[in-house]
Amino acid sequence: MAAVTSPETTPQPRVYFQTPPGTEELVPQKQGRVTVKYDRKELRRRLNLEEWIVSQLMNLYDCEEDEVPELEIDVDELLDLPSDVERAIRVKMLLVDCYKPNDDFVAALLEKVRGMQKLNTPQKKGELTP
């Protein structure tokens, strides 16, 4: 068993690292900063909307969250469409296998989407917009 000694009485060992001969010492490179700035309020609205969509789909499909069919209701895609009529058609296409009436869900979803902003990913400097 090792004896316990205080740091005052026994000097602590030190480890020194040496660069092997013939190799240059590596200079740490600066890490590039990627800053993604989104409006927190808009992100919160998106999260609340997604949670609402999941709960509504659970009601429409009479199932638990993990049993809800894989539906990709893309808010940005809906916002790209020029009219509410086209948005409604798109959502109804996604709900084609839902046998419950879904008009109320579609109307409420379009109401919630109205006024939202698209979440664009920030572009790198010098990158052209499509």
Image (tube, rainbow, N blue to C red):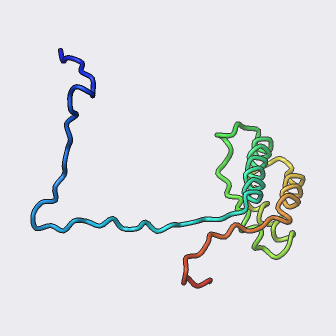
Q: Position of residue 19 (x, y in %)?
A: 16, 59
Q: Residue at x 83, y 47 (%)?
A: 100
In terms of depth relative to the viewer, which is nearer, 12 or 117? 12
Residue 88, picture quadrant: bottom right
Q: Residue at x 81, y 67 (%)?
A: 87
Q: Position of residue 128 (x, y in %)?
A: 58, 85
Q: Where 111 sits versus 56, above or below?
A: below
Q: Residue at x 89, y 58 (%)?
A: 107
Q: Where 77 sits versus 100, above or below?
A: below
Residue 14, picture quadrant: top left
Q: Residue at x 43, y 66 (%)?
A: 31
Q: Position of residue 103 (x, y in %)?
A: 88, 55
As drawn, is 104 to the left or to the right of 74? Answer: right
In terms of depth relative to the viewer, which is nearer, 36 or 14? 14
Query: Which image quarter holds the N terminus?
Result: top left
As drawn, is 32 to the left or to the right of 73? Answer: left
Q: Where 92 sits versus 51, above or below?
A: below
